[in-house]
Image: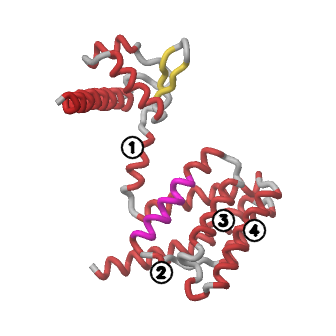
Amino acid sequence: MGGDGSSLQAAGRRSLVDTAIDQLREQLAGGAWPVGSRIPTEHELAERLQVGRNTVREAIRVLVHAGMLVSRQGEGTFVRSTSDPAAVLRGVQRSGIRDVLEVRAALEAEAARLAALRHTPEDIARMRAALAREAEVIAAHPERAGREATVEHDLEFHTAVVEAAHNPALAEVYRYFGASVRESMRSAFGDHEMPEVAVATHAALVDAIESGDPDRAEVACRSLLAEPTAAVEQLLAAIAARK
């Protein structure tokens, strides 16, 4: 009996915290406190939400972890963002393959431009090494060329391109979109229908980035992405026709 009672108390406690989180999230999204401003004290928030201070403290901790709030010792808690990054990512997960692929392409094209201006010799070496591994796998498995046998190496190559831009924020966003595209395509098409990898266009992108010309790098990147994008369009059309 005691164990059941403890479980019920814990569940009730969790429910209160979740409710407080939702209410604070709504306040932030509604603009109750602008970005950069300090939110009310735990005592004030507890009175507003009609919950205990410990509940408010836990709710704030969750929103700090989510990136919406930031706590500064001795100063209070301040608004970092009025939108919940987790909610944004959930929205991305509900998007279609074409939508996510288009966003990834936009990120990658800008990364290629920046990489042309900021790359180091080590960045170029990393891209060429990833491409060489990709080519080796294709040569060893011609019947599966460009599909599941090269997925990991292809992602490694594209990640190297983006990280050569030396923009940590761009790299983090791209890493998420890159993984989302890969999983969405595998789920929808299966490994054996994954678009093929064209080593020549990948090598052309590395050459363009190494040249230091951002316009050339962007053109090379969009050329590289045109083939897989077209392949996805064809696969989506085929799937729609079968329905």
Q: Report the amino acid beneath label 2.
A: His
Give the mark nearer the N terminus: 1 vs 3. Answer: 1
Quadrant of image for the C terminus: bottom left
Give the mark nearer the N terminus: 4 vs 1. Answer: 1
Q: Chief secondary structure of the magenta span?
A: helix
Which quarter of the picture shows residue 112?
bottom right
The residue mark sitting in front, 1 or 2, is 2
Q: Secondary structure at mark 2?
A: helix
Between 162 and 216, the one nearer to me in the picture: 162
The residue furthest bottom is: 143
Q: Residues within 10 Å of mark 3 (few under 14, many from 20)?
A: many
Which residue corresponds to mark 4?
128
Residue 227 locus on image (x, y percent):
56, 76
- Marks 1/2: CA–CA distance: 32 Å
Q: Residues within 10 Å of mark 1 (few under 14, many from 20)?
A: few
Point out which mark residue 157 bears: 3
Which residue corresponds to mark 1?
87
Point out which mark residue 192 bears: 2
Q: Secondary structure at mark 4?
A: helix
Give the mark nearer the N terminus: 1 vs 2. Answer: 1
Q: Report the amino acid beneath label 3.
A: Phe
Give the mark nearer the N terminus: 2 vs 4. Answer: 4
Q: Residue at x 41, y 22 (%)?
A: 33
Between 223 and 18, the one nearer to me in the picture: 18
